[in-house]
Amino acid sequence: LVWSSPRAPGAFAATGMEEAKRRRYDRQLRIWGEHGQARLESCKVCLLHCGPTGVETIKNLVLGGIHSFTLVDDALVTPRDLGNNFFVHESDLGKGRAAAVAAHLHELNTSVSGAFVDESVDVVVDQNPDFFAAFTVVVASRVSMKTLAKLDEACRARDVALVALDTLGLVGTVRLSRTEHRVLEAKPEETDFDLRVNKPWPALMDFARRFAPGGVIGDALTDAQRAHIPWAVTLVNVVEGLGMRDAPPSAWTADRRAAAKAAIKAAFLSRARDAPSADDAEAAATAAALGDAVLPENATEALAAARHAWKAPGAVPPSLKETLSDPKLDALDKNAPSFWFLLAGLRAFLRGDGGDEASKLAALPSDAVMPLEGSIPDMTSTTEWYVELQRLYREKADADADAVLRHTRFFLRAAGASEEAVTREEARFFCRHAAHARAVRWRSVKDELVWADGAGAALAAKLADPDATVAWCAARYVVARAVDVYRETRGRYPGAPLSVDTNDAHMMRDDAEDGRELCDVQGDTQALRSIVETTLKEIGAEAERVNGGVVESMVVEAVRCAGGEPHTVAAVLGGVGAQEVIKLVTGQFEPEAHTLVYDAAKAVTAAVL
């Protein structure tokens, strides 16, 4: 260990974050919150190889405030490193690359501990797989598929996440691997509030009726009070007045939707258009001419949100239905993560059963309703009415979460686990985010290496994908795999200078000038082309039919780049890699479930495997 920090990881979660730390991490706290930052601050990352792609990844994580990093690399700093790695300097030439990079990384954030290991990555993976048990995430950069497969097995056996990245010229790949990653806080870009205005529970219905005595909205209220009726309440009363409470979305024809909007307008325009005396006749005529323009703001909000009247209340998302059909839910043991017990409790809640054995194979009812999430949007209202409405939704959400918890504890007891393994707060948190709960599983690197578990067929399908970008990136991946095979067999990248230390030593010319590096571009191109053709045959594809024969030009480009790692491309890959690490560590957002290919020349990405 070369540097350390006295802080305890995640301590602020219990004591409150220090003001200085809050200012430092202000922007990211707005994204993943203090609980997400606490998880990040307990994260220990291991980086294999300190080239620009891996270093850019770890740099972003150090700036984000991880607990510690450990760098594994036995290479020395060379002049080539100075051209693409900002974390080595001229004064570092000849020194260990891991030590040099670690020193400069530590300068970015002194609260992050740092260490380095001057050993070969291949040796560590082969001889000391238990080394990786101490880490939360392993980031592997420029690791061969053969070594990566062994590393993946070691990480899976120890429940450690793996993120593999590589940059080859203008092409980069990012691939995650883990036995299982559970997502709860998916944070989708588009969400909509679940207000149940067309399926109100008794307390909400009673509250709404206070604003519509005798079925007339705002009948006993002043104009000022009517202008502050929360629009959710207006919609509850409009739906009730049309006799559409509990009606399915299919019952809401175009005429009925129009009728609902007309009812909203009528409720708030009627008084403006009345002329109780001759003195008010002119004002009433003016109001009638203005039409919707005289509507108070809360009525305009109700019209804009009218879709809630015919939206399916608490509908179960298709992605969640798929998660709830996971066989793991019917084979729970006491060691299963609480996520699965909560999902089992949610499924029982949706079925309306007690979670007995007979109900395990039952399908979800078509009218199943999710636990209420409990939040409401801003709306024009008095503070008193809005707070009371908030309380009603919060109490209903808590009641639904308690019901899910009761089902969950049934499954905990059945599995021989403690009922207290899931707390009430955990159940409430789960129910707030349950709509987007899912489990992500990755194909093992070993299966991808030998085209097992459908990997070959999946890649062949991508090569023939009608989306030109997907097919292009799939071809890029094929060439990248061929480069890996070439490197594994010859000890260097295609196009790289020949060396007496490689299997190509016999190709050195005796008459080469002293000090001049020699390359066999033609021979390397031919050899790489042959590997690509073999790879395509293995997966059932043909080179000449792949994307109009572009594979040939990609082979030439791969030889020309000679395994180079341009910093501009590595920086992009480092940003993507760091984001994926953060997703895995914080449990927020959905991680990339497939191998991602980035083509910097075309500025496109695609998931190919």
Image (cartoon, rainbow, N blue to C red):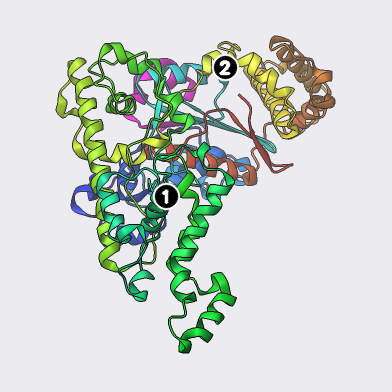
Q: Residues within 10 Å of mark 2 (few under 14, many from 20)?
A: some
Horizontal side, residue 547 vs residue 394: left or right: right
> Reading the chain from its start, which is encountered first: label 2 or label 1?
1
Q: Which mark is residue 311?
A: none
Location of mark 1 (residue): 239
Magenta range is 116-139
* For residue 399, above or below residue 389: above
Specify the quadrant of the image occupied by residue 525. Answer: top right
- Residue 99 location, x and y as percent? 43, 40
* For residue 217, above or below residue 42: below
Horizontal side, residue 333 vs residue 380: left or right: left
Q: Which mark is residue 448?
A: 2
* Quarter that holds the N terminus: top left
Please report the residue visible at 70 percent of the width from the left and 43 percent of the height from the top: 603
Q: In this rendered view, identify the residue nearer to me: 394 or 448.
A: 394
Horizontal side, residue 312 vs residue 285: left or right: left
